[in-house]
Amino acid sequence: MMEVDDEISRQTQIIRPAIRPYPAQYEQHWLSKKGRVLLIRAIMPEDEPLVVDFHKRISEESVYTRWMSNMQYDERASHSRLIRVCHVDYDRDIALVALDEESCAGKNCKLVAAGRLTKMHGKNVAEFSVLVEDDWQGEGLGAKLLLELIKHGEADGLDGIEGIVLPTNRAMIHVAEKMGFESVYDKELNVVKQYFSYKEAAPTSKEDYDIQLRRFTCPINI
């Protein structure tokens, strides 16, 4: 009987969950440069209404800076798209959101920023994206989310993190470079490719970069 119990115990230790559980360890309170308190945590499926409202408050300039196109509100806030945005496979992605704690004390909780890492197919590298509501820009929130994404990538054993931004997005370029990203300007496409290495991994190949650019300009993420 003891041998059976030992075997059951051994198999129980081997079995791992098929899907990673919700990463509650990312939940934290954070104070912005202007003294505003935010709750930062991983995104939840029930956040969809907050994401819809978030996109109502994003300016056309911020939309273009993020997607490099004039992606319309109806497309950004469509249910079919936000199902994929808010339901995250934590083995592949991590999506963090920042909530205005003052608004959440009442009934009108506001999501004011979001950041995401998405693993690239066939590589141990992830693509990052960050979007901050216009009224909250300049408070260090984008830098905070990027820092948390870098920490996640390291804990997840990634080789590196990549991103593509417009040359006019000087704030993100500056923040990323301060955190150790290398920036390379692509004159032909008029974009800046950014790369952060944990293990001195080789930057993205031309073929992978073309795929990344198409995904970045037509993404499912926030």
Image: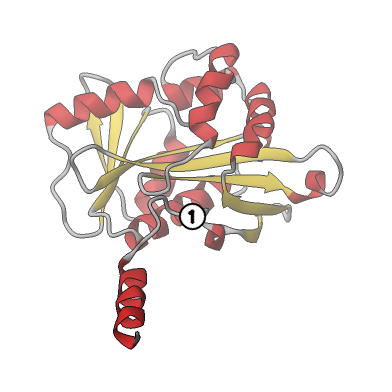
State the residue in front, 221 or 79. 79
Amino acid marked by disc 1:
Pro
Instruction: Give how far across and how far down residue 76 sits, in percent.
Output: 54, 19
Identified at 22% across, 23% down, the residue is 187
Instruction: Give how far across and how far down residue 206 sits, in percent.
Output: 13, 29
Identified at 62% across, 61% down, the residue is 28
Q: Is residue 176 left or right of residue 82?
A: left
- Say if 203 sits above or below 55 in the image: below
State the residue in front, 64 or 28. 28
Number of residues whose C-alpha sits closer than 10 Å to that of mark 1, classed few (under 14), some (14–19) or many (20 or more)? few
- Say if 45 sits above or below 206 in the image: below
**Quarter-of-image position of residue 195:** top left
Q: Residue furthest front?
A: 1
- Say if 6 sits above or below 100 in the image: below
Q: How many marks?
A: 1
Q: Which residue is mark 1?
A: 21
Identified at 57% across, 44% down, the residue is 43
Q: Is residue 19 left or right of residue 200?
A: right
**Which quadrant of the rendered structure holds the N terminus?**
bottom left
Q: Residue furthest bottom?
A: 2
Q: Is residue 52 left or right of residue 150?
A: right
